[in-house]
Image (cartoon, coloured by chain):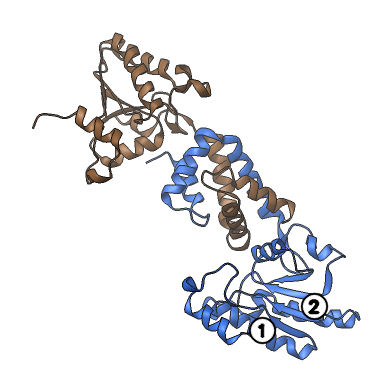
Chain colours: A blue, B brown
Amino acid sequence: MFSPLIDELMSSLRCLPGVGPKSAQRMALHLLERDREGAERLAQSLHKAVEGVGRCKSCRTLTEQDFCGICNNARRDSSIICVVETPADVLAIEQAGTYQGKYFVLLGHLSPIDGIGPEDIGIDQLINLLQQATANAEPIKEIILATNPTVEGEATAYYISERAKHHNVLVSRIAHGVPLGGELEFIDGGTLAHAFSSRRSF
Amino acid sequence: MFSPLIDELMSSLRCLPGVGPKSAQRMALHLLERDREGAERLAQSLHKAVEGVGRCKSCRTLTEQDFCGICNNARRDSSIICVVETPADVLAIEQAGTYQGKYFVLLGHLSPIDGIGPEDIGIDQLINLLQQATANAEPIKEIILATNPTVEGEATAYYISERAKHHNVLVSRIAHGVPLGGELEFIDGGTLAHAFSSRRSF
């Protein structure tokens, strides 16, 4: 209906998560009618990010440097590693503001059905880290597994704990239960069951 | 928090309508983790569209050609012009499928408070079209005003009707009232008042 370049822009915008045909149309027309400068800036940022952003050589998070800001920070405790699924999880934990150790970002989870095995989410690299730290006489004391409480996340956590337990390191899993401010009435059965089975003495 | 290129990408994504900080973060991480090809394609499309897309010389809609598909279509009735605010309005009317005339796209509406006057929305060009058509002995018979039923849209329609009435042309406004399938119970008072004052004998 629109001219070819506009149609092409609309279909390209569909690669953004949560953008359907109607939003893509609104976005394309908004940019062309009212914000061509912003559109050009977005094109540049996309291009630079795709070209420049790789993975941190230590923790695998997304960064354009060799090592990310947290891995480079000498004040972070190198003896604790928190394993998460995505860079967004790192941000969430950092915003909570209590964790002072380092991270390891899987960028995914084990999912045999999608053909994602341990090598795709860098578990060998994590085990290497453990061995190297021990060899350097700065052993890692604890690995905190903070993958999502989904079937795949639990399987990934279990697999990592099995691999890590041969390396003289404490492996822990973050607690699951009723969230703060949550009302029992609205909590799902799975979470409640977990909260009961993991109850602590008062 | 993220590395500079990722932060820059997130802030650039905010130029899209309806995209706040959380969505921008989700989009940036999704593209970098899972769809770099799509991101590169989007960058190219944005760049090409910003460079290539201008306005149709006749109807002012967005197109990369000199004249848009509808203005170029010899089977459309050149004696009727429908005035709309945006290219999305053209699409909506085309999808209704009954209108066979041509369009004139203002790309905006009169809005003195934002400094948008008649020259910014091409009203002189519209009057020129009228004069030229008369000079070429193919006069325009009717102008249908389909601007939005907002304060600015109504003012724009009124202004165009005042300017056009000196050029021997019928000026009409699309009907406003209860939409098909609308239930009276949920229709706002302004629309109902309009529906009553514009009632037709049965």
What residue sits right under mark 1 in the picture?
Answer: A202
A147 lies left or right of B185: right
* Mark 2: amino acid: Leu
Locate residue B105, reporting x and y percent: 39, 28
**Which type of secondary structure does the marked residue at label 1 adopt?**
loop
Q: Nearer the viewer, residue B57 or A145?
A: A145
Q: Residue furthest front?
A: A202
> Image point 51% across, 36% down: which residue?
A32
Q: Residues within 10 Å of mark 1 (few under 14, many from 20)?
A: few
> Image point 53% across, 35% down: which residue?
B52
What residue sits right under mark 2 in the picture?
Answer: A129
Q: Quadrant of residue A133?
A: bottom right
Q: Nearer the viewer, residue A36 or A184?
A: A184
Image quadrant occupied by the N terminus of chain B? bottom right
Q: Nearer the viewer, residue B105 or A73?
A: A73
Q: Chain of mark 1?
A: A
Answer yes or no: are tags 1 and 2 on the same subunit.
Answer: yes
A77 lies left or right of A177: right
**Which type of secondary structure does the marked residue at label 2 adopt?**
helix
Q: Chain of mark 2?
A: A
